[in-house]
Image (cartoon, grey):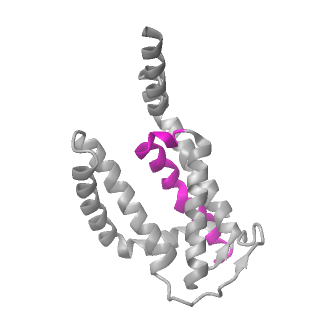
Amino acid sequence: MLTSVKYVLQSLLNTLIFMPKALAVGFCAGILLLVIVCPDKPLRRFFDYFCTATYLFVVAKLTFFTRESGSHPRAIDFQLLGTFHPGTPAGQFFYENILLFIPAGIFLPILFPVQRRWYRTLLSGCLCSCTIEFAQLITGRGYCQVDDVLTNSLGTLIGYAIWFLCSLPYRRKHGAEGHDKGKNNSRSSRKKR
């Protein structure tokens, strides 16, 4: 297990090479989205957009743009837990795919109130993972593996659990989740009529 942690940490350190570009893209996208989408809540929303755009840049770079087109076979690997090899360099991909999608499980419910149900966030994470795997299959820029969809979905679920636990005090203080609050308001207005 410690060997796997060492390989994953080394891989995370390698991503620092393109972090300056990711932060620049995140900053520009954060400002742009703030002006277009949410000018009334500048500071809080800027941070949400900045983090999400930075994260999306890193995901695109790791899963697609650091690889040569056609460098991987254009085939689908249906073997479940085929990447689970603890203690080996190849086994790091199992853990990295989980870690890669934890932020997705956090950012989806923050940005989109409709995603504040675990099954919606899980479905969105799974669809995003399938999109990446399909793009890798078409371009040959990565291995198309069912295992990756499984681990990415698990990462999304872990991220959602982190968001859920961290937002619990806020949601208790303010009543209901964003989309549920809207439903409750419309119900109460119907009762008044």
Residue 187 lies, with reference to residue 149, above or below; the image says above
- Point out residue 65 in the picture as x, y percentages from the top left corner: 45, 80
Q: Is residue 114 left or right of residue 157?
A: left
Q: Name the residue nearer the viewer: 99 or 192.
A: 192
Bounds of the magenta segment: 88-116
Per the picture, the main secondary structure of the magenta-coloured stretch is helix
User: In front here: 135 or 148?
Assistant: 135
Q: Which residue shows up at 70% across the image and 67% down it?
A: 147
**Is 96 part of what is drawn in magenta?**
yes
Would residue 33 appear left or right of 129 to someone viewing this image?
left
The residue sitting at 50% across, 84% down in the picture is 67
Looking at the image, which residue sits at the far top? Answer: 192
Which image quarter is the C terminus in? top left
**Residue at image location 36% in from the left, 62% down from the top:** 54
Quadrant housing residue 5: bottom right
Let me know if residue 170 is in the magenta part: no
Residue 46 left/right relative to 76:
left
Where is residue 88 drawn, in percent x and y? 68, 75
Against 74, residue 46 (above or below) is: above
Report x, y in % for residue 109: 47, 43
Q: Is residue 153 above or below residue 192?
A: below
Q: Is residue 65 shown above or below 174? A: below
Q: Is 66 left or right of 131, judged from the image as shown?
A: left
Task: Tell me the quarter of the picture where residue 60 sits.
Answer: bottom left
Is residue 142 at least partly visible in the picture?
Answer: no
State the image coordinates of residue 101 (x, y, percent, origin top left): 54, 58
The residue at 60%/61% (across/down) is 152
Front position in the image: 110 or 99? 110
Residue 147 can be seen in this image:
yes
Farthest-out residue, right: 79
Q: Tell me the quarter of the image containing the N terminus.
A: bottom right
